[in-house]
Image (cartoon, rainbow, N blue to C red):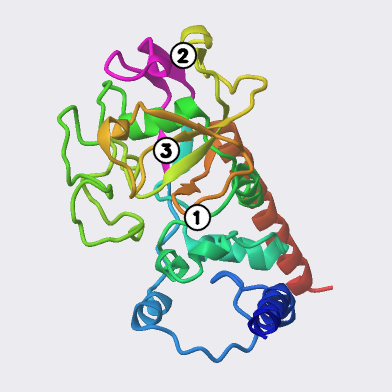
Amino acid sequence: MLETKFKVVFLFVVLACAAMPIVAILRGTTLTPFEEPIGSTDVAQPEQDSAAKEAPVQEEMVTIPEGPFVRGTESGGFDEQPPRTIYLDAFSIDRYEVTNHQYQQFVLATGHRKPGLPARYAKSGGKVKGTNQPVVYVSWDDATEYCRWKGTRLPTEAEWEKAMRGSDGRLWPWGNKEQANGANWARVQDGYEVSAPVGSFQADKSAYGVMDGAGNVIEWVADWYDETYYKSSPEQNPPSPEYGTYRVLRGGGYTTTGGDVRITSRSKMMPDFRDETIGFRCAISKTGMKEEGEKKSDEFTGNQSSRESKTRPK
């Protein structure tokens, strides 16, 4: 009799376990915070309400003048050596990392996929969705497509380092002396659990006025990663290596600790990887700026001629 009861209980347990995946399928896949259901009536949290009312930061690009700068350092890892004087043509780079608001305009205009947030971060994902927080969970290809849509491109690794480091070989945006609270890192309690609105840390500003190179989020750049490229690259306008397995990431993020917060530090990752600590910014060459200016001038001239022809007496 006891054996029969045991068999019945065991059968119910087996049936319950087998039914769990079916129930999950019927309930549907859990949506990420970036993919809220249409018509959702969830009440927003006070932090989200505040972020929604925040005025978007003004988009700006900073022009980095042509000339030499010191790339690399003897104080870093093997792939940061040797330090060499590199010459770059003039270019412009975003003053701030690309924000959630800016990336959302791209998604709405093109239908490009939204930043992908793993389901395991569903409850905490709202913390990185602020209007002026840097967009995260974007792959190298996502970042490249956004910059192309803006008429720009990802900065080369050399451009990124010069824009953040200046021309005097400093190890941090503010100089050569380490400053624990200089950027949004995981070293001190700075009031931000995750990324901060771009430009929040005034110390984290380069000699050219480019913000958040040392902290906030790590950034994709254009180059393939080559551990020995600092030894073999051209000394003038070094391009990306022709091929590779990983793309380069530069800068520190809000989870960064230890010695890898130097501006010279190099990281690498598979180009399709997406994470809550990785964002990007865009750049454009001097030639590209000239072409864009000529295009806008032609458009203005064409529009002006069209208006004049409509108002000219026949």
Q: Position of residue 47 (x, y in %)?
A: 35, 77
Q: Position of residue 237 (x, y in %)?
A: 52, 19
Give the residues drawn in magenta, as a range.
62-90
158 and 232: which is toward the camera: 232
Q: Amino acid at mark 1?
A: Val
- Kindly identify the residue that appears in the image at 50 percent across and 55 percent down: 136
Dot 2 or dot 1: first in sequence order is 1
Residue under circle 2?
Answer: 230
With 102 as the anchor, is 114 left or right in this view?
A: right
User: How crowded is the residue under tag 1: few (<14 C-alpha within 10 Å), some, or many (20+)?
Assistant: many
Marks 1/3: CA distance? 25 Å
The label on residue 63 is 3
Marks 2/1: CA distance? 28 Å
Q: Amino acid at mark 2?
A: Tyr
Kind of element beneath mark 1: loop
Q: Are marks 3 and 2 in contact (CB under 8 Å)?
A: no
Report which quarter residue 104 is drawn in: bottom right
Q: Position of residue 166 (x, y in %)?
A: 31, 28
